[in-house]
Image (cartoon, coloured by chain):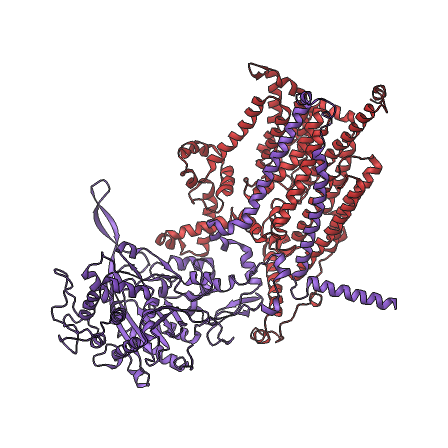
Amino acid sequence: MILTDIESFVAIAMITFEDIFGGQVLERIPAALSILYLIAIGVVIFFLISSLRGAFARPDPLEEDLPTGVASRITQAVTNRSLRIWRVVFFVLAFTVFGLHVYWTLIAADTNEQFQNLTYKDSRQRRANVASLRGWMLDRTGTLENALASYEIEGNRGLTRKYRFDSAFSHLLGTERGSAGLERVLYGGSIDPMPSAVEVLTTIRRQEDYSQDVRTTLHGELQRFVAEKMAGKKGAVVVMDPQTGDVLAMYSGPSYKLSEARTQDGYLELEADRRNKPLLNRATREYYVPGSTFKAFTMIAAFRANKQGAIFPSSAGGYLAARGARPIRDSNGGCAAPYGCAPLDLSQAFAVSSNQYFARMAVELGGERLGKTAELLGIGAYDTPAEALRSNLFSDIWNSDNDRLRGALAVERSAMVTGKSASRYDLALQGIGQGYAGQMTPLQMALIISAIGNMDGRLMKPKIEYGIEPRVFSDVLAPFQAARAREIMALVTEGAGGTGGRAFGAVRSAGIRTGGKTGTAEKDVVAFDSSGRMQTVKKRRRGANGKWETYDAPRMVRRVDSWYVSLAPIERPRLAIAVVVESGGYGSVTAGPIAADIVLKARDLGLLRNNGGRR
Amino acid sequence: MMKSRASSHLLILLAVTALTALAHYAVHYGALIRGYETSWMSGARNVGLIAILALLPPIFSFLFKFRGNWSIYTACVILFSIGLTAQYRLFSDPEYALRGPERAQARLDKTKTMQLHYVRQVYDADKKAMLGLPPTPPSPVDISQEIRRPVVEDADAVLKSGRTVAPLIAIVGLILAFALMRYERLLELVRNNGFLIVLFTVGLLILAAVFSTAGKFLGEMTPWEPSKIPFLIGFAAVLAALYRNLARTYWGLPSGRDVVPLVFMAVLPFLPFFLLKDFGQMMVFSGVYITLFAIAVRRFAQRFVLIGGVVLIFSILVVGALPVNVQEKIPLLPTVAKPVKEILPDRIQQRFHLWLDGFNPPSPETTWWKKDYDRYYAELVRRNPKLPALVEANPSLKKSINVDAWFDNLAFQPAQATFGLNAGGITGRGIGLGYVEGIPVADSDYIYAAIGEELGLVGGLLVTLSLLVLVAGGVRIAIDARDMFSKLCAAGLTAFLGFQALVNIGGITRALPMTGITLPFVSHGGFSLITSFVMLGMLMALSHRNWVDRQLAADLREGRIFTEDMEEKE
């Protein structure tokens, strides 16, 4: 009888022990013990302090009997006063020292910039991340086999991070140092790898909600295909779903191996390569001159102003935006084939890529209308060139609740100048993707056409996380206008004289209707020699003292970039593609075929199918 | 309200012993989570040491009829308990205890264990299968089922280790110091020969300094720690003899006959410590001597001159070492700072830079940094011969190499300590759950950072409060003391313990430049621990004397004894 009593008592005691300390998370027991230790020692010290309080209050032995006036003057009383003052000074010093402990613990992480920038030097961050394993990063198929980032057991070295597609995803996943990528932002925020003792006790339930896996909108196979197509080329490709904003692929070439960037030497070498800039994510952070692809923008602006019916003449002498300005001619030096110098409507002009038409259209629309359209599409519309040239990271375009993710993916904001300082000639040039409009990122171009590709004429915010709801960035066009604009874009691959016709022949014969736009843009860039050093030329300028002096100026060379933007399938686009290849020559020759191959690959992967509802 | 009675303190201290055992169990469990085990014997030794200290109050009451204040003693035992726990945590960790490739292996083993625990707890069967592990659903880890890796226990080694011997000597030292300091005769003798004591100590110290290397003697020992006690006694004796004369001034100046011996006595201890390049001790000494001087001297002008002078010297040093970008913000400052900067030794400039601008690497051209930087760079070039060409092509690369060099070398330890404080948060990561093994020398100089990481702000606050209890108690003893010499002794002992703690903690929280001195009672140490305990014993003896005096005074007042009896007693 007594024995069972003891047994049941022990059993009850064990249950309480389990309740308090819990069995799920191992760390609970030491965490609970250390909190207990802190509390108990705190109580003991509290007793000590209260026992000393009496000593504080007790008068000095001498002063007990003497009248105060006398007592305050004798040596001992003076000394004791000094001792009391010293005690106060010491207390102040001690709390100052402790106050700095408070600063480093609670305040520095939020306010001290130097401290924040150096957290990657914290060895425990690395240790904790390695020990408490990041989640797996899945592609849009959601299968473990296709995980973009997972783990493998590598011989004797424990679990190591494995990147199945490695260099295809380098820019998206990012390195451990330098600017952050998905690897650093997807897992850092949600669960602290280094929880405090209290958090261990109260919030962490490892089994129930500890899976940190993230499913992304990216498609591993598609991205790998894009990387293969871009092998050996510089440039960028963005593939997104215009209906939802899902980013399916985003590649920047040249890329690098993530394993290389993990070592210090490897990273330094990548950082030093200024000729190829492998660490730069060209899709979001590099400006390109969009050239003719930007006519899609001017077309949107025309629709918004109800000028889609405008018919403009074209002449062999080109379009004169203002008196004395350089005439704007078509690419063949006169009027674009096959219509010759006949009046063109919007669809004809778009199909043959008439510079004269779109330059004139931009001038007719005026700066205000162009600026409004630009803002709706996420482009910064500025009053002066100086403002447009300023670097400006734009993170709010992304559809994500994770601040760090938006920050890591933030785009270098594309810019135009549409204010009063923009002349008629400036507007004309911008209408054909030249001049001040020469600051477009590849992602921006994908966004412009995705607004046309969206069934409701909306620009969806791009997103990377699979699970979150699509969000609208802006209402750009009415649905019927968007539908009409898509038909016009289809003429580029289907119409007579369409510039994309040849490149998309295979796609057409596969029965997929697409819309697109070619672009060929010249850009002056700094030249490098074969060893990666910047080339310079001697130039003369007037120095600060008013004398002429020679200096080394970077040598500039003209580069011809090849562009193609595409929507597929055109009836209900699932893909909005932007391809740019540096030094690629004509858009229809280099970028166009890559876009066509991507469409075919996407078809093979089942990405063109419409899965019923609006997803 | 607690009375400062031996019995209640016995109870408190027994509770502290139990808590120490609990904390050691936490260390043990934390070790199991990371796949290694702790030594039971060392743990038992630590708890045993606290237990011995816990049993001293009744022994003192019985043996010495001790009736002084126990609070300072208990505060010190609490500090010691926190320190022993932190040390046990560190020394059990193979990653902390080992060096070289063995250490890397230990780290890898720990990481693997933690990863596998995580996988077992969190990953579902599919994921486990992909890793090539048995496909089981997520399940809790049963520590008791893991493969044991017990530490090889060697009773002989544990008993003979410095971590057993030093605290035992310290406890004996505490008892001896207490027993001796009770004798009026001895105090008298010491007081009358202050100058000789100081001279003798200086002689010994200079010998030690000559044979020392890099501020250490015979390996890792600092046998000059105990010299604080004779220095203090000597200075207190001289000051007690002269302080009255100092108040007698001619045209506002005290007579040279009184000033010269004082200054001489004050400067003497700085010589050996300067030779030893022990700037931490110099800081503590200046703090203590200013304290004693300010307490003993009665004229405001004299106090002002001394304290003002020291503050001035210190601020000139600070100005000289301020980072350039800060200097440029204040007009005239660069002009003032330039000559100072030229005089300041490299070592001090380096310490000051680490203190005031530690997260900002100095330019690789800086004199005191160039050598280390060049060595680091040469090592990089050895690994990657292409580097110089890369640096030439891209000058910004040099900057990032400099940052790496800075944080892998000089700034590594202080930066890791600050990150540790930051990681600790309010309640800490929990005993055994932090990554304190990543901070070099976390068992002695940097132990406060280890406490801050695993016990958090609260742990730091408890250490600070214990220190304040000690200081408040010590000041009380000084106030109650009847003569100037014992007043100065009590104040000096308190100031030594207090300032040493402040300089140590301040070095870690970046309130002061970091200097390699220990945190009294908390840090692992031989001579420094012994010295601290001896000082505590002396303070307790002075406290006891106060009680005896008070008792005598009361008896006299109430007519229980008469002055004639007193004389007989003497």
Location of residue B447 in the rendering, given as x and y in whole percent from the top left corner: 62, 47
Would you identify the image quadrant in which residue B558 lies? Answer: top right
Relative horizontal placement of residue A480, taking residue B37 as reference (left or right): left
Q: Nearer the viewer, residue B554 or B533?
A: B554
Q: Residue at x 19, y 76 (%)?
A: A345
Q: Nearer the viewer, residue B210 or B357?
A: B357
Rendered red, the chain in question is B
Relative horizontal placement of residue A478, taking residue B474 as reference (left or right): left
Q: Is residue A165 above or below residue A541?
A: below
Q: Is residue A18 above or below residue B92?
A: below
Relative horizontal placement of residue B487, taking residue A244 as reference (left or right): right
Location of residue A534 in the rendering, given as x and y in whole percent from the top left corner: 30, 56
Query: What colour is chain A?
Result: purple
Location of residue A293 in the rendering, given as x and y in whole percent from the top left corner: 27, 70
Q: Is residue B239 visible?
A: yes
Q: Nearer the viewer, residue B112 or A395?
A: A395
Would you identify the image quadrant in which residue B463 lies? Answer: top right
Q: Is residue B224 visible?
A: no
Relative horizontal placement of residue B525, taking residue B511 as reference (left or right): right
Would you identify the image quadrant in which residue A368 lies? Answer: bottom left
